[in-house]
Amino acid sequence: MQIKDFANKYSIQADTIRYYEKENILKPKRRENGYREYDEECEKQLQLIMVLKQLGFTIKEIQQLLILRDESISTECNNSTVLLLNQKIMKLEEKIQFYQQALKVVQTVKELVNEEKYLENKEVIEDLLVEFFKSIYKRGIS
């Protein structure tokens, strides 16, 4: 499959595929005429990349995981993989906490404005939003 068809199949831009190639996380075979050939292995690789991106992995982290995947099994390789995954777990847990707090704030604001009560609750809403801002700013989430 050529790049245009490959990109269309996964609803991504051909430039994104070229970028993944440049970053050495996607490696299509080349035909004699120089055209890229995206086979089943490329499809599996792209699906993995897309899943990891959805999970919040950066391109650099994906590169690290792919390097570790291709290394021979060893204690050092295993420890490096576990360390990287633990770091990602911590970041995901922080995001979950943030979104849980954000959900509570939005639900509270909704209750405060329900039935046209915004004006009588305006100060409470503003205080709530300021406190939420302070809590996320203190944690470094912006």
Image: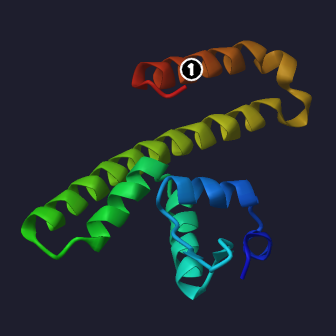
Q: Position of residue 94 (x, y in %)?
A: 41, 42
Question: Looking at numbered disc 1 in the image, what kind of residue is underneath it?
Answer: Phe
**Left or right of 23 in this view: 40:** right
Quadrant that contains the N terminus? bottom right
Quadrant that contains the C terminus? top right
39 relative to 46, above or below? below
Rendered residue at 85%/26% (across/down): 117
24 relative to 113, above or below? below
Determine the residue located farthest toward the left in the rendered image. Answer: 75
**Left or right of 4 in this view: 80:** left
Pick the front one: 120 or 101: 101
Q: Position of residue 97 (x, y in %)?
A: 45, 43
**Which colour scheme appears in the figure?**
rainbow
Rendered residue at 68%/37% (across/down): 106
41 relative to 19, above or below? below
Pick the front one: 119 or 78: 78
- Element carrying mark 1: helix
Q: Position of residue 110 (x, y in %)?
A: 76, 37
Q: Residues within 10 Å of mark 1 (few under 14, many from 20)?
A: some
Determine the residue located farthest toward the front in the rendered image. Answer: 32
Residue for badge 1:
133
44 relative to 105, above or below? below
**Residue 82 shows up from this direction:** yes
**Residue 58 shows up from this direction:** no
**Residue 71: quarter of image:** bottom left
